[in-house]
Amino acid sequence: MRSSPARLPLVLGVVVVTLLAAAAGLLLHFGATGSGTADADAALLTDAVAVREPALTTAAVVVTTIGSTAAMALLAVTMCVVSWLRGRRADAVFVAAAAIGGSALFRLLKALFDRPRPPVATRLVNETNESLPSGHATMSVVMIGALVVLLWAGRSTATRVALVATATVWVVAVGATRIYLGVHWFSDVVAGWFVGATWLAVCVVARRSWGSRPGEPAPVDSATG
């Protein structure tokens, strides 16, 4: 029996979610056990400390503050309000679910793995909770990714490439600052990226199953005009 065209995006979405979840699980395992990507943790932290200088530190603090979980929450509220006022209620729900679910997920994983952060002597900013996964990395992927998703519909190929490129550079920059500032291991950041990507993909698949792409109006029921 052949799949209908309408089901193909859903099937593809489930495959993407499954692959991302598998990768996230593996990276969390590496961070928790000190294997795989965690093999580079100590060396990269040492390298980050070695290149520190005042101007770079100031820039890192600015980027990490703008990319903080609090700032991402503010971005989420803004996107929800704008979507709601534009009559895109489903998009507002999509953003709210992405933000609330992503935050709950990374906090749950932190408590589950209870991984210590790098030594206090290496930290340039104060952090007190667990290390794995990075909340900054997770929520930057979730919320900046959600913004790209909402802006995607109706854009030219060049604009879409620019959106993805800009989002990627920003997400990488936020993650890099966490290592530079000495508050996360490299493996925390990489795991956070994939945890965030997994949750974002889940939200996008759920949103698509409602009948229209994010950023597009829902289909009009012909029976009601």
Image: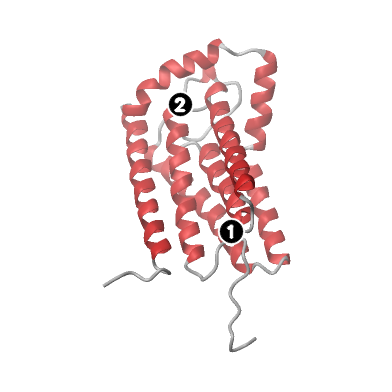
Name the spot of residue 11 as percent of width and height, x first: 37, 61
How many residues crowd mark 1 within 10 Å: few (<14), some (14–19), many (20+)? some
| Left or right position of 32 against 209 | left
| Left or right position of 216 against 117 | right
- Residue indicated by mark 2: 185
* Quadrant location of the N terminus in the rendered image: bottom left
* Quadrant location of the C terminus in the rendered image: bottom right
CB atoms of marks 1 and 2 within 8 Å: no
Q: Quadrant of residue 61?
A: top right
Q: Amino acid at mark 2?
A: Trp
Name the spot of residue 30 as percent of width and height, x first: 33, 32
Say which mark, if any, is on residue 65.
none
Depth check, front residue: 25 or 184 = 25
Name the spot of residue 96 as percent of width and height, x first: 59, 58
Q: Amino acid at mark 1?
A: Ala
- Whether residue 116 is visible, yes or no, is no
Q: Residue furthest left?
A: 1
Q: Residue furthest front?
A: 157
How many residues crowd mark 2 within 10 Å: few (<14), some (14–19), many (20+)? many
Depth check, front residue: 33 or 220 = 220
N-terminal of the two: label 1 or label 2?
1
- Whether residue 16 is visible, yes or no, is yes
Residue at (53% x, 43% y) in the render: 141
Distance CA(mark 1)–CA(mark 2): 29 Å
| Left or right position of 78 against 138 | right
- Residue indicated by mark 1: 96
